[in-house]
Each structure stands twice: as C-alpha cells, then as structure tokens.
Amino acid sequence: QVQLVESGGGLVQTGGSLRLSCAASGRTLSTYAMGWFRQTPGKEREFVAGINWSGGNTVYATSVTGRFTISRDNAKNTVYLQMNSLKPEDTAVYYCAASDRPPEWVGIRGAQYGTWGQGTQVTVSS
C-alpha cells in the first residue's frame, strides 16, 4: 500500500505562486494515476487536476486551467502541483490521491482514488 504526504502549502497573496508536492512511500508511484483535490469547510471535495502513470495525460478543472500545472517525477516518487496566479477562491486544504487504474487513465472523481494524503493548507489573501 502506498502512503502519501503532501507539503508546500502556506499563505500567499493574490497573484502569487506555490508548488505543492506529494511524496510517496511504501510502493513506487509509477503505476498509479494521481490526482489533486481540494476542500473548504462546508463544501464537497473538488477535483483540481489529474495525471496518468507516465505524465502524458493530464486533466484540469475549468477553474484552474491555465493557472495550475500537475506533473510527476516517478524517479523521485513525487507528484507536484504548480499553482500560479492564485486567487482567494483557491484557498482550501489540498489533497493528493492515488489510483491503481490502467496506464492511460486519469480520473476526476474522488471515489475513483483509493489512497489519500493528509492534506496541506493553502491560503490566498486578498
């Protein structure tokens, strides 16, 4: 079973950037599709971005397209979320998740992912 740990969250001003990391242990990440989700109090968990095994397929939520970039370094067992042009509405706890689906698969629903990290807080001040 793979374990996931997110890092890189923090407080940033509107228009700023952050890079989140999701480090895996226990198993190699190279055979997992990965996703980033976010959640704010009182709201449902929201899909942000997803990436397939190789990194060749990526999917983004409309709200972050053009601002966020998901990537992975399988040699380092790490997935990243580069977040640029941050807005106050991006404030949330961000979670990474892993799914052992086929190589080209990218999922956008949380129920499709079986392993989750503990989350990292991102706060964007106006």
Image: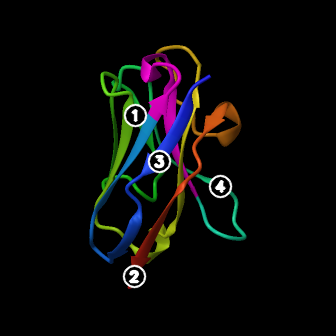
Question: Residue 126 got which mark?
Answer: none
Q: How many marks?
A: 4
The amino acid on which the numbered mark 2 sits, given as a three-letter code, is Ser
The question of residue 25 being in magenta is answered with: yes
Where is mark 3, residue-wise? 6
SS class, disc 4:
loop
**Lower sequence index among marks 2 and 3:** 3
Where is mark 1, residue-wise? 58
**Lower sequence index among marks 1 and 3:** 3
Which quadrant is home to the N terminus? top right
SS class, disc 3:
strand
Q: Residues within 10 Å of mark 2 (few under 14, many from 20)?
A: some
Where is mark 2, residue-wise? 125
Question: Residue 45 got which mark?
Answer: 4
The residue that appears at 27% across and 73% down in the rendered structure is 15
Residue 52 coordinates in the image, percent (x, y): 44, 25
**Lower sequence index among marks 2 and 4:** 4
Distance of mark 1 from mark 4, alpha carbons?
19 Å
SS class, disc 1:
strand
The amino acid on which the numbered mark 4 sits, given as a three-letter code, is Arg
**Lower sequence index among marks 1 and 4:** 4
Distance of mark 3 from mark 4, alpha carbons?
16 Å
Residue 119 coordinates in the image, percent (x, y): 55, 53
The residue that appears at 46% across and 54% down in the rendered structure is 62
Asked if the residue under mark 4 is in contact with the one under mark 1, i.e. CB atoms within 8 Å, the reply is no
